[in-house]
Image (tube, coloured by chain):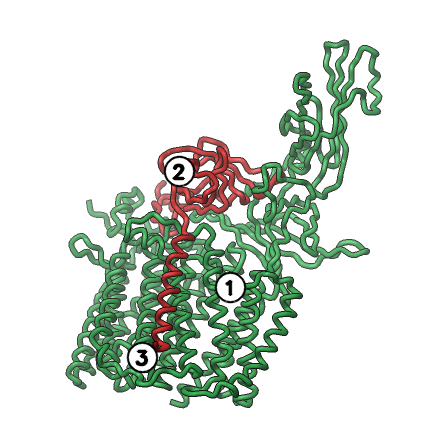
Chain colours: A green, B red
């Protein structure tokens, strides 16, 4: 039966599909044309290539434009719109919704390549043909990722213009599609609330620009190998490589800031596989860019420069593969699931990997090699050493992160390190120390030969300064770990060395100071990372003074703390009160107030509102809140809270439990801890008008509330005429607690105590974690300075060239 | 010997060190039987929550202790003591990975990873379009 559906916007999908094919075909055309232009050194082929790339660019931009129109107008007949948007989604999340799915991220990637490719068409001059061959071929692969056609059984790409009704068999048989007017009542699934966050708007485009920028030095390197032109490629490639270092680095540090501000990592870096996957290509890019500089100034290290630059691009593909293939599934909290395109990604990765290996092997004999060996005391030697350390460091991260891949390939059953943070830190710390020390002194060396004594005289100052600072800061922070002290020394040495270089050698000529500024920044960044992570203080440890280690040392209550509404607990130098919750849409905010105590009493210092986002799709997501001070941050995170509305009933008592206790045993109520002190004959001073034959037994129970105040409860058990039992309960009204005897076990000497709680005492509570991160601002300041330094040197280099 | 060669040798040595180090740091996936016959050795155990038995979390006693029963992939059930606050939405988890050691007859987990219904899962549209299917 044919149904004539009403209100569908099928034209837009038809146009979209047309442009998807056009973008694919045009990039194929451009690749072939540029390839022919390079081989035949032919201008007309080159013109065709440029035309092809322009058409591809136009098609890609049109696809993106159409998708935005669909998204903004809620065309839910399209599966892609239905999956990532809903009619209630605020417009400010339009961008987030666009790149939530894989199709959108691949288009974002395509977009940046289009921008970069068009700039290269203008600037690459005689490198245009060969470089654009490489860029166009990558675009061909990216275009195929959204093609969405089946070749026999293999699905090539995932198309964003598929219709819920016609292209998705799982959906087509749903009863709602019997209604020709189904669109009237259909709403989208909506953007995952986890991603309804401003970080999600700014983080992906910058990270993807960083990813995309690795294509430029890569293309120049491939072109140089292909064309046997080893002298000309680094000059235009170098500013691109450093620009890539700056943008990619910004993306990574933003990821860290996002994790710190909005995720529950409890820090800015958790060595999560997804973070690692971006860090690895960045490290090789930094190494590669420095090696290009050596080759430019000294003519050596060409092979190593090729290897690292090519690796950066391939590792970006690898990183995409890792995060999107689902292979990390069991090891990472935020890996994506497979959309069935990991095979395709793997093919592209292997294609470029083998292409690069083949080209290097083919050209190895031709490559110019430096005749003389590098001098020990020369800048190029130590820059080379620094780049190699970065390479080894990235190798170590890549290896451990790849354990799930190794398991797949070799059929092994290794699990990632049980304590990843410790594992990576213990490996990466020595690498960081070595790199920072090289960064501190290599700048004082000139290229080629140097006299050791004058060089040494220059670095004596920074060495002494770093030593003094290390001793001072180390003592102030009570830093005892020798590795941390080494790191403290190394990072202050980098800062001192480069500052000294700017002031003494450059005489403050700021034009040449880009590199030194970024090195100063990097030193400060590492200093901030070291101090905030090594000296952070979990202030939410158990302060109730009650021993909760009865389950053994393993269960010391040392990170999370229970905070009842209205109670005030000391945490670090603060006193903390939980002031209840507010519900606003899908957000439940918990008001946690920090107070200071003086003789005049408590004074409110600041209020934090960590929240839990009620999220049907992803589960409820907690988000911390952080108070920023110049010298430290107070991070507050809700680790657990009951999310149902707390009990409204305030009257009466209800049974909590009956516990058998001997002298010295402990029992727990919701807001107090009970310890049985002793059991004695008598009424404990109560006038119960007992007859002489009556036997009275009283228990003395010590009660601690969570303000660690001590109270006493003395329930009595009366045996009347040796047969009739009359328990006399003891009540503590302000705690909402009632205790009475239930039974006496004459054999064990234990007693059964019935504990009752008033309904009003079921107060609202949160389990929270609070951490003070000292000097974390150094990290952000250092990062900003690093990026400014690099951008500045890129700018001066472009201006000069 | 040239400096280049020395550097190369150091490079290879450190690279091998990194591989060996990573492998020796790496933990092992195991089921409960293996973990309980090697007490006090750390393992990764994959399994699912036993929903038939109650979970216990009493923050007033210890905010860093959460107890539940897990079935490993062979269907063996053990009680787990997790040294953390109860994870939000624990009951929704589809799969659990525990990192920890067996101690006597309980599995003491230091770390937990949960797989919840995926963010990119294609749920049926009925969940969100209840109006439409009426």
Number of residue marks: 3
Query: Mark 3 or mark 1: which comes first in sequence?
Result: 1
Q: Dot 1: within a 10 Å radius of its alpha carbon, few (fewer than 14), some, or many (20 or more) residues?
A: some
Residue most extreme to the front: B1
Against A372, is A695 above or below? above
Q: CA distance from mark 3 to mark 2?
A: 52 Å
Front-lying residue, A15 or A565:
A565
Instruction: Specify the subunit that label 1 lies on.
Output: A
Q: Is residue A498 above or below residue A610?
A: below
Chain of the residue under label 3: A
Q: Nearer the viewer, mark 3 or mark 1?
A: 3
- Chain to which mark 2 belongs: B
Pointer 1 residue: A257
Q: Secondary structure at mark 3?
A: helix
Rendered image: mark on residue A302: 3
The answer to whether B50 is drawn above or below residue A194 in the figure is above
Quarter of the figure with residue A63: bottom left
The CA distance from mark 3 to mark 1 is 36 Å
Residue position marked by numbered label 2 in the rendering: B34
Q: Which mark is residue A3?
A: none
| Point 57% across, 66% down: residue | A485
Viewer-closest of A161 and A392 = A392
Q: Quadrant of the N terminus of chain A?
A: top left
Element on which disc 2 rests? helix
Say yes or no: labels 2 and 1 on the same chain.
no
Residue A211: image location, x then y, percent: 36, 69
């Amino acid at each position: 039966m044919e149904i004539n559906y009403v209100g569908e916007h099928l034209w837009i999908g038809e146009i979209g599909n047309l442009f998807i094919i056009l973008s694919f075909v045009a990039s194929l055309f451009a690749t072939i044309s540029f390839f022919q232009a390079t081989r035949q050194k032919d201008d007309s082929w080159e013109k065709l290539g440029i035309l092809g790339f322009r058409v591809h660019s136009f098609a890609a931009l049109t696809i993106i434009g159409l998708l935005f129109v669909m998204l903004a107008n809620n065309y839910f007949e399209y599966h892609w719109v239905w999956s990532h948007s809903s009619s209630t989604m605020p417009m400010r999340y339009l961008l987030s919704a666009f790149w939530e799915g894989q199709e959108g991220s691949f288009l974002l990637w395509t977009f940046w390549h289009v921008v970069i490719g068009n700039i290269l068409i203008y600037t690459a001059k005689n490198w245009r043909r060969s470089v654009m061959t490489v860029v166009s071929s990558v675009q061909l692969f990216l275009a195929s990722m959204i093609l969405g056609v089946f070749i026999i059984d293999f699905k090539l790409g995932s198309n964003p213009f598929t219709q819920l009704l016609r292209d998705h068999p799982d959906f087509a048989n749903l009863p709602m599609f019997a209604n020709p007017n189904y669109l009237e009542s259909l709403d989208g699934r909506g953007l995952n609330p986890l991603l309804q966050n401003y970080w999600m708007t700014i983080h992906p485009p910058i990270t993807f620009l960083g990813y995309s920028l690795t294509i430029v030095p890569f293309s120049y390197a491939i072109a140089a190998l292909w064309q046997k032109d080893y002298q000309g490629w680094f000059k235009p490639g170098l500013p691109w490589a450093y620009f890539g270092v700056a943008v990619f680095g910004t993306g990574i540090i933003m990821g860290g800031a996002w994790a710190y501000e909005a995720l529950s990592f409890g820090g800015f870096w958790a060595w999560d596989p997804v973070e690692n996957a971006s860090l690895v290509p960045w490290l090789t890019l930094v190494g590669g860019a420095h090696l290009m500089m050596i080759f430019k100034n000294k003519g050596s290290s060409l092979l190593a420069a090729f290897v690292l630059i090519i690796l950066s691009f391939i590792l970006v593909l690898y990183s995409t593969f890792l995060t999107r293939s689902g292979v990390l599934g069991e090891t990472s909290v935020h890996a994506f699931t497979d959309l069935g395109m990991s095979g395709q990604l793997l093919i592209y990765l292997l294609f470029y990997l083998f292409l690069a290996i083949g080209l290097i092997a083919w050209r190895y004999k031709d490559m110019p090699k430096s005749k003389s060996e590098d001098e020990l005391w020369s800048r190029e030697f130590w820059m080379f050493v620094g780049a190699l350390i970065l390479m080894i460091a990235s190798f170590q991260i890549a290896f451990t992160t790849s354990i799930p891949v190794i398991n797949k390939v070799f059929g092994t059953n290794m699990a990632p390190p049980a304590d990843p943070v410790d594992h990576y830190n213990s490996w990466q710390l020595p690498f960081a120390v070595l790199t920072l020390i090289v960064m501190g002194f290599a700048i004082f060396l000139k290229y080629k030969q140097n006299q050791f004594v004058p060089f040494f005289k220059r670095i004596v100052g920074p060495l002494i300064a770093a030593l003094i600072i290390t001793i001072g800061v180390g003592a102030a922070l009570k830093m005892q770990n020798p590795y941390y002290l080494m790191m403290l020394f190394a990072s202050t040495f980098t800062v001192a060395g480069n500052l000294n270089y700017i002031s003494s050698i450059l005489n403050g000529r700021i034009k040449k100071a880009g590199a030194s500024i970024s090195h100063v920044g990097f030193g400060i960044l590492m200093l901030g990372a070291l101090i905030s992570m090594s000296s952070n203080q979990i202030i939410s440890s158990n302060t109730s003074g009650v021993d909760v280690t009865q389950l053994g040392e393993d269960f010391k209550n040392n990170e999370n703390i229970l905070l009842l509404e209205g109670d005030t607990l000391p945490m670090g130098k603060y006193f903390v009160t939980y002031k209840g919750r507010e519900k606003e849409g899908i957000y439940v905010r918990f008001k946690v107030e920090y107070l200071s105590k003086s003789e005049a009493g408590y004074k409110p210092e600041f209020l934090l509102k960590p929240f839990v986002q009620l999220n049907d799709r992803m589960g409820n997501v907690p988000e911390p809140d952080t108070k920023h001070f110049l010298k430290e941050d107070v991070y507050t995170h809700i680790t657990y809270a009951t999310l149902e509305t707390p009990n409204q009933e305030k009257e009466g008592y209800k049974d909590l439990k009956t516990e058998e206790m001997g002298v010295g045993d402990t029992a727990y109520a919701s807001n107090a801890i009970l310890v049985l002190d002793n059991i004695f004959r008598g009424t404990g001073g109560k006038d119960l008008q007992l007859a002489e034959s009556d036997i009275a037994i009283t228990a003395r129970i010590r009660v601690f509330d969570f303000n660690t105040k001590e109270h006493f409860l003395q329930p009595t058990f009366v045996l009347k005429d040796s047969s009739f039992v009359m328990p006399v309960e003891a009540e503590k009204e302000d705690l909402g607690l009632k205790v009475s005897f239930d039974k006496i076990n004459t054999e064990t000497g234990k007693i059964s105590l019935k504990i009752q709680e008033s309904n009003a005492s079921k107060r609202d509570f949160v389990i929270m974690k609070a951490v003070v991160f000292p000097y974390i601002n150094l990290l952000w300041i250092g990062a900003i300075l690093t990026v400014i330094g690099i951008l500045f040197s890129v700018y001066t280099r472009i201006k000069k060239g | 010997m040239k400096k280049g060669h020395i550097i190369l040798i150091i490079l290879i040595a450190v690279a091998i060190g990194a591989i060996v180090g990573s492998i020796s740091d790496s933990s092992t996936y195991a089921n409960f039987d293996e973990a309980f016959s090697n007490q006090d050795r750390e393992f990764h155990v994959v399994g699912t929550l036993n929903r038939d038995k109650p979970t216990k979390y009493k923050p007033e006693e210890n905010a860093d202790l959460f107890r539940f029963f897990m079935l490993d992939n062979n269907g063996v059930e053990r009680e787990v003591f997790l040294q953390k606050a109860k994870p939000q939405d624990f009951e929704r988890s589809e799969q659990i990975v525990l990192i920890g050691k067996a101690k006597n007859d309980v599995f003491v987990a230091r770390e937990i990873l949960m797989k919840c219904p995926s963010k990119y899962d294609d749920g049926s549209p009925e969940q969100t379009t209840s109006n439409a299917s009426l």
